[in-house]
Image (tube, rainbow, N blue to C red):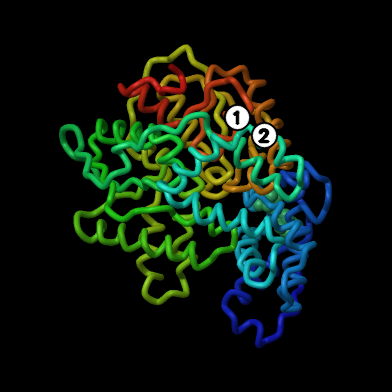
Amino acid sequence: MQTNFTAEQLTDPHIAEAESILRKCVHCGFCTATCPTYVTLGNELDSPRGRIYLIKDMLENGRPADKDLVTHIDRCLSCLACTTTCPSGVDYMHLVDHARIHIEKTYRRPLVNRLTRAVLAMTLPYPARFRAALRLARLGRPFSGLLKRVPALRPLGAMLDLAPASVPPVSAIARPAVHPAAGERHGRVAILTGCAQGVLDPGINAATVRLLTRLGIEVVVPEGEGCCGALVHHMGREEQALASARRNVDVWIREIDDDGLDAIVITASGCGTTIKDYGHMLRLDPHYAGKAERVSALAKDVTEYLSTLELPMQERKNLTVAYHSACSLQHGQKVTMAPKALLRNAGFTVRDPAEGHLCCGSAGTYNIMQSEISAKLKARKVKNLEATKPDVIAAGNIGCLTQIASGTSVPIVHTVELLDWAYGGEKPPGLA
Ligand code: SF4
Ligand code: SF4
């Protein structure tokens, strides 16, 4: 694609990067076929190619974002299916990240939208606040229908709908600790405790620690870890996202330099995609660029790390698993085979649903902010998963687990919970 940035504009490294991404796009439109919003809405401006044009126009003319552009960029799930499909290697992720930062800096959103986003940014990344908010949301749940009737208040209604009926108690697994390997130590990893997942389902990290320590891996929960920054990063709140990244980089570099780490294991693939991008996010910060690169190089989805451990093949079980491949794992991190291979090796029958490339509609805060599109994507995903006639659904991202669980009666668990069970751990509570 031809671009018309001025030499002065290109002195800004963010604009220079956007320009080099834009130049790779050859307008072929292959990406439209796999874009969930284009597939759902049928509007070119809700396709990757349409959004790329909108972003190009805004950046080239150096103008503030307007309502039209914000509508179409807000509808993007950041699922990155387009990056998997694109034959030209267009780095849509970093382009839309840049557009979101530009929107945040130049566009004044309507009051309720502003407030909702502020509440989410001040709550979700902080486990104690998130836990308190979930308890409050339970009380407000009867009013969700009323709120959803007013378009501007729909996100608040969606937020109440998503609140679980009960919140698990605070888990010891989130506390700083060293979990020693059982028997001889073969490796040492840090595990991300994160934010929302630890509140919604602490059993996921508990299963990971049990499994890894049984396999001879020491697991450390370092003091000072926190939210990876993904949720606010996708809102364009750059400074808040970078502050989270710097804090985590400091924590993990200390751990790497003290006792060494073979990997930073992440059980929420949305977080994994962001942590693997820390090197890029902090590339212009001379104090952090090198350290962030080291951290990103060590970041591994739990299934990626488990694949390096050569787990023994287990006896076949009479249990069919529909595997939902989270977008952040398949498109963001290109981890596609490892989770299914591990499950098969562990004795499960694994089925792939149709349209596995399409997002379930969770996408961070998308199911709150864009609840109507999200609901359509959820219904489509659930139909495809249920069509495989599974005994259980497995996925590797808490957002997907919560989203899909709200649309089906089929039990749904994290992949690592099934693996822990297959290798001598507890039966996942979701299957009890
Ligand atoms: S990230 Fe997903 S929703 Fe956004 S343009 Fe790409 S395919 Fe479409
Ligand atoms: S597939 Fe790639 S090159 Fe083709 S229109 Fe989409 S982003 Fe551009």
Label 2 sits on residue: 378
In the picture, residue 254 is in which quadrant?
Answer: bottom left
Q: Which mark is residue 157?
A: none
Q: Residues within 10 Å of mark 1 (few under 14, many from 20)?
A: some
- Where is residue 63 shown, x and y percent of the image? 74, 76
Q: Is disc 2 in contact with disc 1, using a CB cutoff of under 8 Å?
A: yes
Q: Residue furthest top?
A: 318
Q: Residue at x 33, y 36 (%)?
A: 171
Mark 2 and mark 1 lie on one chain; the one further toward the N terminus is 2
Residue 397 in view (yes/no): no
- Where is residue 320 shown, x and y percent of the image? 53, 18
For residue 262, above or below residue 295: above
Q: Is residue 255 left or right of residue 234?
A: left
For residue 183, above or below residue 130: above
Label 1 sits on residue: 406
For residue 44, above or below residue 214: below
Q: Is residue 344 left or right of residue 88?
A: left
Badge 1 marks a residue whose secondary structure is loop
- Where is residue 136 shown, x and y percent of the image? 51, 40
Front one among 22 and 265: 265
Q: Residue at x 33, y 45 (%)?
A: 191
Q: How far is disc 2 from disc 1 in space, using C-alphas?
A: 9 Å
Badge 2 marks a residue whose secondary structure is helix
For residue 248, above or below residue 270: below
Q: Residue furthest bottom?
A: 8
* Residue type at the position of mark 1: Ser
Residue 226 in view (yes/no): yes
In the picture, residue 21 is in which quadrant?
Answer: bottom right
Q: Residue at x 43, y 15 (%)?
A: 316
| Label 2 vs label 1, nearer the camera | 1
Front one among 135 and 388: 135
- Where is residue 47 shown, x and y percent of the image? 76, 52
